[in-house]
Image: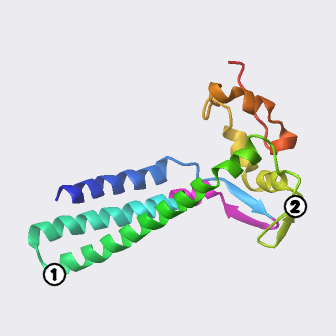
Amino acid sequence: MIVSIVLILMGLFSGLFGYFGLDIEETWELGNTEFPSPMALFGVLAILVGLFTVVTGLLGLLAAKFKKCCFTLPFMIFTIVLSIAMLIVALLAIIGQGATEQVTDIFCKGEGHDTAIQVNGESYANLSEYMMKMYGGSIDRYMCTPACPCDPAHKALYQKATESTTGFKFTVSPT
C-alpha cells in the first residue's frame, strides 16, 4: 500500500512538472516545417508518464484494499509496462554515459568540428552547424545566465570556447 501511495505522489509530481515546469510555447523550424520544441515534447511525455503512474498507484491501492481480480490484473499489467519503460530509460542512460569522452572532446575541447555529418537525410557541414540548427535557440537563451549559471570550476573551458568552435554564444558573467 505504501508503494502505491509513493507511485501516486511520483506520478503527480511528474505530471505537474511536465505541465508547469517547462516552456512549451516554443517551436523550432526545420526546413519549411515547424515542430514543437523538445522541451514541449518532454513536458507532454512527463504528463503522460505521470498520469500512467497515478493510475498504476490507484490500481495498486484498490488491489490491496479489495483483493479482486478486476483491480489486480490491470495493476499487474500496468506494473510490467512501467517496469519495462524504466528499463528502457536506464538502458538509454547507460548507453549515453558510454559516450562521455567523445562528447567531452567535441564540446569542451573543440575536436571533431570539421567533419561533415548527415542527419535524417539532411547534410550539415560540421557538428557545430547541426547543433546550432537543432539546439541553438534554447541553449543560447539559457547558457551561462542566472537561469543556468556556468560552473566557476570549469570557467576556463567555456571562456576558451567560442561561437566558431561550438556554434553557441556563451554569455559568461563577470564573476
Residue 49, placed above or below residue 157? below
Q: Nearer the viewer, residue 93 or 40?
A: 93
Q: Nearer the viewer, residue 23 or 128?
A: 128
Picture mark count: 2
Q: Is residue 171 something one can see in this rendering?
A: no
For label 1, count other residues whose C-alpha is less than 10 Å away and answer few (under 14), some (14-19) or many (20+): few
- Residue at position x 31%, y 70% from top? 79
Question: Which segment did they paint magenta?
Answer: 31-43
Q: Quadrant for the N terminus, please.
A: bottom left
Residue on which disc 2 sits: 116
Q: Which element carries disc 1, helix, strand or loop?
A: helix
- Residue at position x 72%, y 58% from top? 28
Residue on which disc 1 sits: 69
Tell me if residue 7 is in the magenta stretch: no
- Residue at position x 37%, y 63% from top? 51
Amino acid type of the residue tagged 1 in the rendering: Cys
Q: Write down the quadrant of residue 86 in the picture.
A: bottom left
